[in-house]
Image: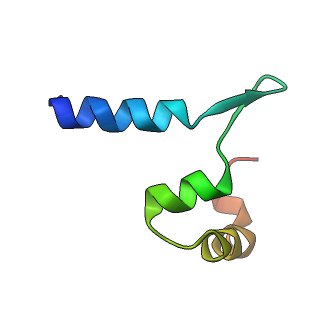
């Protein structure tokens, strides 16, 4: 892995939180990662709930 890839992984890892023993990310952080609005991401999850982990 290149240096840029390591820095990207570090940025993502810093946005993962542990809540009640589960790894979670905020929708705002995920939308930033995928470069979409948070509301669009939430709509996509609701429409395709079976594709996402519980």
Name, please, the residue furthest toward the left.
2
Which residue is painted at 40% across and 29% down in the image? Answer: 10
Residue shown at 68%/67% (left/top)? 45
> Residue placed at 60% from the left, 34% from the top?
16
In percent of width and height, residue 7 lies at 30, 32
Q: How many marks?
A: 0
- The extreme right residue here reads 20
In the image, taking residue 27 as reference, residue 21 lies left or right, namely right
Residue 4's image quarter? top left
Q: Quadrant of residue 17?
A: top right
- Residue 45, above or below 52: below
Nearer-the-camera pick, 42 or 29 = 29
Quarter of the image with the N terminus is: top left
Classify residue 32 as left or right of residue 3: right
Residue 26 placement (x, y as % from top left): 67, 49
Instruction: Indicate whether 50 appears above or below 36.
Output: above
How was the colour assigned to the protein in this rendering? rainbow
| Image coords of residue 27 (percent x, y) | 66, 56
Q: Residue at x 14, y 31 (%)?
A: 2
Locate residue 51, reporting x and y percent: 63, 60
Q: Which residue is at the front of the view, 53 or 40?
A: 40
Q: Nearer the viewer, residue 51 or 17?
A: 17
């Amino acid at each position: 892995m290149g240096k840029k890839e390591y820095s990207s992984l570090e940025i993502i890892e810093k946005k993962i939180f542990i809540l009640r023993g589960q790894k979670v990310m905020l929708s705002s952080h995920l939308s930033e990662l995928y470069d979409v609005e948070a509301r669009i991401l939430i709509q996509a999850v609701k429409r395709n709930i079976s594709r996402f982990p519980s």
